Image (tube, rainbow, N blue to C red):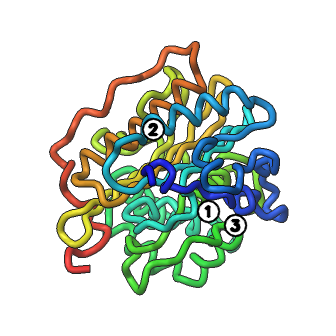
Amino acid sequence: MPRGVRRTLSATLLAGAVLFSSAGLTAIPANAAPASTPATAAANPCRSSKNPRLAKNLGTAIRTALRGRTGIESVGVYDRKRKIVCTVDSARRFDSASVVKATILGAVLRRAIEQKRLLNSTEKSLAHKMITRSDNDAASALWRSVGRTRMQRFLKMAGMTQTKLGPGRYWGLTQITARDQIKFLAVLTARNKVLTDRARRYELSLMNRVVSSQRWGTPTGRPSGVKWHVKNGWLPRHGRHWRVHSIGSFSGRGEDYMIVVLTRDTPSMTYGIRTIERVARAVHTRLNPNQRTMTVESIPDPTWETSDGSVPPNR
């Protein structure tokens, strides 16, 4: 069976992506759900009742970007303005690596909201290090501080029902899906009852200030002038095969969309990044065909091919 057909698309993104009405979030339209049969779904990764032709072209571009790549990929795309939903194997679970740090901060912000306060100076310092530099000690401190019960509560409030917290202190082994990461980005990018506007703006501001060596992935190919927000993760398992992920949201100049690409079993970190950036460029250019885009691939950095350290080498 051809590899493209084996990579089944999750027909349940929508069932899972319409977030709890109590959260007051903008739901992904039900008629944008991908077809349920694997063969049909594989041919139509993107759906939209508002822009069916664009969705079809975008789906073709995503399939082309993934064609022939080594490893396993999962993709989620949601464009609020154009009402487009794309899913490629979006219910498959991956080791989160450092991508989960964005969710940890979401839970920390939710705790402060429930306690009717702002983040204190220690929390702000740790949050800044954790998101902008992907600092692991800061992530571990906040993971311990917020606790598993509050983490689980945040996941439930955000509708992230497919996410499974990592065992004990191993937050980097949290199991994530593209479907749930799209739902998390939806919480960050629209008014809702999970996070206040102030909390959302704070986390997005940190995701817009990651250090230059970590700005690869989903921002690649974005339209000039559109604001990006990103969190990446990179982790080799068992000494060789990599998990490389990137989640990003894009706003401004009338844009409001998000991209998630998760990969595993890639031969190197660089290879995983290139896969992600192929998909990202395909999405950005199809959604913005008449705009000048930043199409240059990320320049390899000395930190590439070095684990983000979210999981100890012997785990």
Q: Position of residue 117 (x, y in %)?
A: 65, 66
Asked whether residue 184 is in view, the answer is no
Q: Is residue 67 left or right of residue 291?
A: left
Instruction: Name which residue lies at 19% across and 64% down.
Output: 240
Q: Which residue is mark 1?
A: 118
Q: Position of residue 294 (x, y in %)?
A: 42, 22
Instruction: Name which residue lies at 70% across and 26% down.
Output: 53
Quarter location, residue 98: bottom left
Quadrant assignment for the C terminus: bottom left
Front one among 169 and 46: 46
- Three-letter amino acid code at the position of disc 3: Gly
Asked whether residue 95 is in view, the answer is yes
- First along the sequence among labels 2 and 3: 3
Q: Which residue is mark 3?
A: 159
In the rendered view, would you say 73 is above or below 69?
Answer: below
Instruction: Name which residue lies at 23% across and 54% down.
Output: 267
